[in-house]
Image (cartoon, helix red, strand yellow):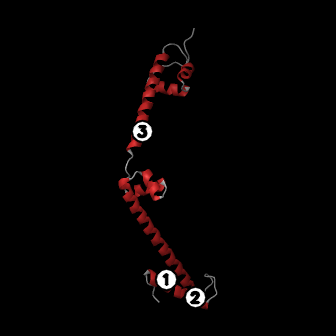
Amino acid sequence: MKLCLEPDALHRQIDARIDLHRQGCRCLGRRCAAGHRRLHARTADIEVEQTTRTEVAAKRELLERAREAAKTMTLDEAYRALGMSRTELHRMTKEAGFYFQSNDKEHKAREVARQAKAEERAKLVELIRANSGIGLSRNFVAKKLGISNHTLVKLAEENGIDFPRWSDRP
């Protein structure tokens, strides 16, 4: 009996073989005679092949849904809509070579935060420069500005400010 790859015919053939097997053998699968052992192996191979085919088809379908979502959605919106993790969705986009829409609001908010931080650093640098020449210690100036000593030293070095460790007290 030759195995056919059509799903219904395949299932009927497998069921017929299993029925024949059950009639003539009381084994638990591995203790069969040689012919029955082959039946178990073929049945297992067919089941694995069918499982693999369904998994591949499901992955293709999910990839197509992700591509369609990428045309109109951001990554955050898509992972909620598709019900998969951000990491898995991000990996899928890298493998397939497509990108999601960018969120302009988030991008602008990050840019505003970067500018505010840069302005704050510039103010700190000016205050450090003003306090470096009047004979105050680094620790005192850091406490006065509300920053750590390490931050003060880092900002002074990055901006070329000569700030002695100790004040020149008589």
Q: How far is disc 1 from disc 2 in space, using C-alphas? A: 15 Å
Residue 148 quadrant: top right
Q: How far is disc 3 from disc 1 in space, using C-alphas? A: 58 Å
Circle 2: residue type: His
Nearest to the observer: residue 99 or residue 159 = 99
Q: Among all residues in the image, which is located at the extreme left? A: 71
Q: Residue at x 49, y 55 (%)?
A: 85
Tell me whether the residue at label 1 lies in contact with that at label 2, contact meaning CB atoms closer than 8 angstroms: no
Earlier-in-chain disc, 3 versus 2: 2
> Which residue in the structure is indicated by mark 2?
21
Nearest to the observer: residue 130 or residue 164 = 130
Circle 3: residue type: Ala
Secondary structure of residue under mark 3: helix
> Which residue in the structure is indicated by mark 3?
109
> Which residue in the structure is indicated by mark 1?
11
Q: Is residue 98 visible?
A: no
Closer to us: mark 3 or mark 1? 3
Query: Is 4 placed above or below 120 here?
Result: below
Q: Among all residues in the image, which is located at the extreme bottom? A: 24
